[in-house]
Amino acid sequence: MDVRAAVAVGAGKPLEVTTVQLEGPKAGEVLVEIKATGICHTDWFTLSGEDPEGLFPAILGHEGAGVIVEVGPGVTSVKPGDHVIPLYTPECRQCPSCLSRKTNLCTSIRATQGQGVMPDGTSRFSIGGKKIHHYMGTSTFANYTVLPEIAVAKVREDAPFDKICYIGCGVTTGVGAVINTAKVEPGAKAIVFGLGGIGLNVIQALRLVGADMIIGVDINNDKKAWGERFGMTHFVNPTEIGGDLVPYLVNMTKKGADQIGGADYTFDCTGNTKVMRQALEACHRGWGESIIIGVAGAGQEISTRPFQLVTGRTWKGTAFGGARGRTDVPKIVDWYMEGKIEIDPMITHTMPLEDINKGFDLMHHGESVRGVVVF
């Protein structure tokens, strides 16, 4: 079938909106009509050429929502008409990782997903008979896409597509980092580095679990109002403090008899390795945990003095907020519909597929929190 898609033809080049061919679902696969898709920094990361797994030509996009149109042989968990969110982190519930209950990083289709193909080793997308790669197993920058059954989360039908698509990455990543990875407790002191889409979701999750002090750090003063909108209690612009950031933050967190200072939890949402170090070193001696959410460029490394770790600080990483997609994503959609978390204010721009490159420009210039393409 012919579908409309934004094709990444090469590193650093604008996406080309065109008609491509999509083959129907095979065994264990589903055809989804994508109704809306978010424009995420991770898509730009691949498009820039910095992603070591980036392949071209490809149909990017991993933050979508839509409706099942057709299912292949053997599919039992979803049916045509079901509303779903595609999952770039699937949940097969059978591989050693899923069965361990220690991680959300399902490995059942990881190899082929990284090669830009479906589990059988082939692509469903083509143009003029030439293969186009899938992206993150989802490829939501097309109005129809094919996914493995284990890579879709069935969600309630009264949730708006143009809002819940954001749960396919940004919301779940930020909220999950707080609830699943850090397991932040009420009364905690936390610092969030980078107040983009991920950082704001970290902040609203910290508010949700009852954190006492929520410090937001960003070099853009326009982010102060955004952070406060979602629960931030203090704002720091590193370019305006006139000294080193870490001791400044540690001093802010000193309270009562605790004159050591430091946050119970810090979250890096920047992907900047220098900031990752600052986030760790702003943690409290003895128990502070620093969660790395941002993705750094290929070949970059993090470093700190061993003393920082020997004295009780912990570095952790998180992917998709530690969420198990088919199990947890429907719950997060429920939280949104019940008013426990907010999404609507973060969807600052909506646009047709033809304007997707403008959406990336808005993101680069810091003018949007999240741009959404509505098909």
Image: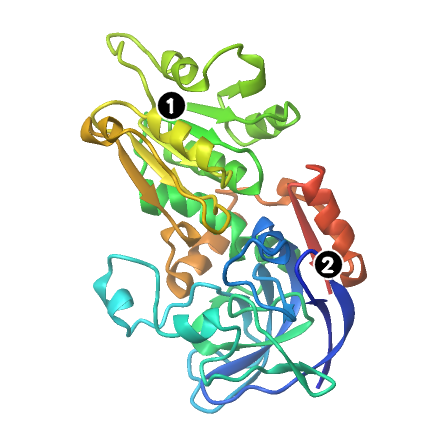
Q: Marks 2 and 1, Cα distance to the nearest angstrom? A: 45 Å
Q: Which residue is mark 2?
A: 13
Q: Residue furthest front?
A: 299
Q: Residue 1, image x and y in percent?
A: 70, 86
Q: How many marks?
A: 2
Q: Is residue 237 visible?
A: no
Q: Nearer the viewer, mark 2 or mark 1?
A: 2
Q: Residues within 10 Å of mark 2 (few under 14, many from 20)?
A: few
Q: Residue 124, image x and y in percent?
A: 59, 83
Quarter assignment of residue 182: top left
Secondary structure state at the residue bearing disc 1: loop
Quarter assignment of residue 278: top left
Q: Residue at x 69, y 55 (%)?
A: 12
Q: Residue 45, image x and y in percent?
A: 58, 52
Q: Is residue 363 left or right of residue 24?
A: right
What numbered label is drawn on residue 212?
1
Q: How is the image coloured?
A: rainbow
